[in-house]
Structures are given as structure tokens and as C-alpha cells.
Image: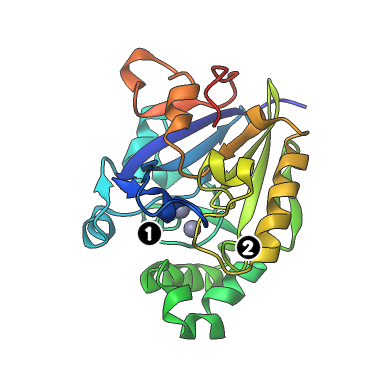
Amino acid sequence: MQPFELFAIRYARNGPRKAVQNMIGGDLHEQGSDLDYFVWVAKRSDRVFLIDTGMSEETAKRRREEHYRVPADAIGLLGLDPVRIEDIILTHLHYDHAGTLSRYPNARFHVQESEMSYVTGRCMCSRLLRRGYEADDVLHLVRSLFADRVAFARETCEITNGLTVHRVGGHTGGSQVVRVWTRRGWVVLASDASHLFVNIRRQAPFPSIYRMDEMMEGYRTILALADGSWDHVIPGHDPLVMKMYPAPSRELEGVVVRLDEPPQAGLLP
Ligand SMILES: [Zn+2]
Ligand SMILES: [Zn+2]
């Protein structure tokens, strides 16, 4: 099986934060980790997948996030043109993962069926559950559905050999993780199924939860998909990712890292 090259592109940041904002049971006064915001690219000679699309500058401003770059432009650093992207996997539809969809007019969006039901159904009557979503992102996806540009996954789905998605739920109704075959083995992009390494390592969830039972089960699923190796789990928002993994080149330091390279040891919390 031909391996994918796998990249994380950092596009925004949120901080400073308290520990209690990052995990249930966290200390009220203790300083917590900042959050980095990423999109991911899995690239092979036959296929390119963009995994999540990040948020627009306007959304970042309104939600007071420190925005570095628009992911649709940043993928140019890897030689990719948003207009030519054919496959986008959305781990879930939160504002920091499914923004700027109109920048990809030729893409098919791969999403869990249960996420689409969740964001268009009665759970969105709850202000708490809908606050992570932008109605315009959801609308764009509904319009894309009517234009034959949405591919639904139901639970586990092989999108191509070497790349599968797995519904874990927990964080939202249909959150999914992505398992990618690389030259160092399977790497699992956990996205918001574990915002930080500390969440999955200590089984202490980030306090943005739809179903706690699925959240805990999701941790087990992610580790199993990573063949039991913490080095093969990539959390969705951890600044440590930028420290552990190497940049593809000097110019891309602090912006892009390669997740198909082995991480620097000894940094895991
Ligand atoms: Zn989320
Ligand atoms: Zn997120």
C-alpha cells in the first residue's frame, strides 16, 4: 500500500487559558495550554485529501481567536490550489473545522451522516450545543448536498486504500477521526475527539461535550486505531504538535509540520 505524506498546517491560536478550560476537573487557577488550530493534508501521487478547512478571518475576529492565515491560502505552501482540491474530509462541522467551504468549488465533502443530522436537527435548539457552529457553514454543506457534493460516511468507512474515517461522536453528534497510512505506520488524526494530548492520556475530556460515554469510548477507539502507540495519535489543538514534529523545510518552520516523520521523544505530558 502506497503511504501518504501527512502534514499539519497551523492557522490560528487561542490563549492564554486556564487548566479548567482545557479539561474537566482542571484546576481553576492553574495556567492551561494554549490551543493551536490546524488543518491537515494527506498527499499521495494518486490522491490528495484536505482534512478540515479551518475558519475565515472574519469568524476568527468575531470569536476573538488569533488568526495567522486562511487555510485555503496556506495550502499553497504545499503546492495545492483550493480550486483543484477534489476531496475534503470534515471531522465535524464546528466553526474552526468547516469554515470557508466556498473556497473549494470542486470538492466533495466527506462527513458523517450523524453529524449532518445533528447540525440540522433538534440538538441545535440548544444554545450550548449550537454555539460551536456557524449557520453559514452548515448552509453551505446543505447546498453542496443538493449539488451532489457530499459523501456520507456511516460509522467506519474506507475512503481509499490507506485512508479510513471512524465515527467516535462524543464531542459532537457525528465527530469522526481519520486514520492515514504513512511510511511510519498508521497515524490517527483525532481532531476534537482529543483537543490536547492530556485529554486522551489522562482520560480527562475537554469541556465541550455532547455525549460523555462516547467521548470515553472514543479514547479507546483512537488508541486502538493507532495500534496502541501514543506516538501515532495526533490531537486536534495541541501546540506540542508543532514542537514534536519537524517542518518540511526551513521556510515552513512554525507553520507546517510533517506527521509522517517520527516525533521527538520525551515531550508527551
Ligand atoms: Zn469541535
Ligand atoms: Zn476544534
The residues tagged by marks 2 and 1 sit, at their Cα atoms, a distance apart of 28 Å
Question: Residue at position x 38%, y 54% from top?
Answer: 28
State the image coordinates of residue 188 (x, y, percent, origin top left). 65, 39
Task: Verify CB contact (< 8 Å) between mark 2 and mark 1.
Answer: no
Amino acid carrying mark 2 in the image: Gly
Front one among 162 and 198: 198
Query: Is residue 229 visible to the viewer in this orientation of the structure?
Result: yes
Q: Is residue 194 above or below residue 154?
A: above
Going from N to C along the chain, the mark reached first, 2 or 1, is 1
Q: Residues within 10 Å of mark 1 (few under 14, many from 20)?
A: some
Amino acid carrying mark 1 in the image: Ser
State the image coordinates of residue 241 (x, y, percent, origin top left). 48, 31
Q: Is residue 11 above or below residue 186?
A: below
In front of the other: label 2 or label 1? 2
Is 241 on the left or on the right of 10, as rendered? right
Label disc, if present, on residue 170 of the rendered structure: 2
Based on the displayed image, in which of its 4 quarters is residue 180 positioned? Answer: top right
Question: Residue at position x 43%, y 24% from top?
Answer: 243
Based on the displayed image, in which of its 4 quarters is residue 109 positioned? Answer: bottom right
State the image coordinates of residue 136 (x, y, percent, origin top left). 37, 71
State the image coordinates of residue 190 (x, y, percent, origin top left). 60, 45
Question: Residue at position x 73%, y 56% from top?
Answer: 217
Is 23 on the left or on the right of 82, as rendered? right
Label disc, if present, on residue 102 of the rendered structure: 1
